[in-house]
Image: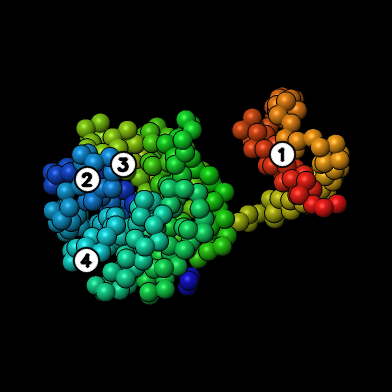
Amino acid sequence: MEIVDLNKWGIKNDDLPLGIVGPCSAETEEQMMATAKDLVHKNVHVFRAGVWKPRTKPGTFEGVGEPGLKWLCKVRDTYGMKVGTEVATDEHVRLALKYDIDVLWVGARTTVNPFAVQELADALKKYGGLDKPVLVKNPINPDLDLWIGALERFSAVGVTKLGAIHRGFSTYEKIQYRNVPKWQIPIEFMRRLPNVPMVCDPSHIGGKRDLIYDLSQTALNLEFDGLMIESHEKPDEAWSDASQQVVPARAIEITEELELRKAKAENSATINKLDALRKQIDELDHRLIAILAQRMDVAKEIGQVKKDSNVAVLQASRWDELVGDRTEKAIAQGLSEEFTTRFLTAIHQESINNQDKLMHSSK
């Protein structure tokens, strides 16, 4: 995929992050125009609104369809804003191109299905939309290859303006957020595809309007290229996702309050200090890897003893005791319980894998 200059998309003309802002759903013409009027601002480059809404359960509001595209056009004609919406079928693409919608995005529920993604890619080629900017949201499950594969399908048919949207990942656990961020996944995406713009959707990650600012700042700290924020003139009365939408004034306020970070340090003193600290990190990582390798060697010896004595690999009581002891010590050292648990679980799983291999070996 070629290097993408957002200015060439015709929707970004300054150094600010790409701002895609607007209501979750297009509900009425009046709602769209009132919201758009209050979002006219240099930090808002694209007015967004869903006209087709893939909902979890039938019988809920699933979008107004084609009339919403007409309202988007009226927003563009009246306020000079670029406009964007989500597409999920061949017919959606046909209609979106019919009304010359400026930016299209693919939702998480669509990205998870390669057949559906291919249908959209083929539709863009069939209806002459290969030059449209297409943003692809991460799949609902944390599958990086599936996410990248979706972009590759669009690239393969000739779509040239491709971007990604991080909206978090579904989880059955009750957590602070609606969707767990798992920041390491979009970070790895950006490492693999450094020339593809990455947009953060803090509204869907947080699920609550008071979480949008902090999530947006985190995204900018990680060098994301833009934000997609849901904004409604009367968010509490919204027909979908009311709790995660903010009034236009707050959406603009968020964009103005965010701190932009430099991609690299420029001051020589800062550069030298960072270099010294990074060398410390490198040395500690080397030592950590060596210690982990030693730990696995000991785990293998334990596995051999278990095999010789016909003892089961998993010792649940020992594992419970270890987790409790190590977590307590880690917290005392300033590490979070969540990180410690994930770290210990990964080590324990690798130990079990090694011991299980021994159990199946002939030696």
Front disc: 3 or 4: 3
Q: Which amino acid does label 1 sit on?
A: His
In the rendered view, does 166 fall on the left or right side of 30? right
In the rendered view, does 279 fall on the left or right side of 191? right
Please identify the quarter of the rendering in which residue 321 is found. top right
Q: How crowded is mark 2: few (under 14 residues within 10 Å), some or many (20 or more)?
A: some
In percent of width and height, residue 322 lies at 75, 28
Front disc: 1 or 4: 1
Front disc: 2 or 3: 3
Residue 62, label in figure:
2
Tell me which residue sits at (21%, 32%) in the image.
Answer: 237
- Comparing 264 with 59, the one in front is 59
| Mark 3: secondary structure | loop
Q: Mark 1 points at which residue?
A: 348
Distance of label 1 from label 4 (alpha carbons):
52 Å
From the viewer's perspective, is residue 117 above or below residue 55? below
- Of the numbered discs 1 and 4, the one sitting upstream in the chain is 4
Q: Which amino acid does label 3 sit on?
A: Thr
| Mark 4: secondary structure | helix
| Mark 2: secondary structure | loop
Q: Name the residue under label 3.
A: 56
Residue 94, label in figure:
4
- Of the numbered discs 2 and 3, the one sitting upstream in the chain is 3
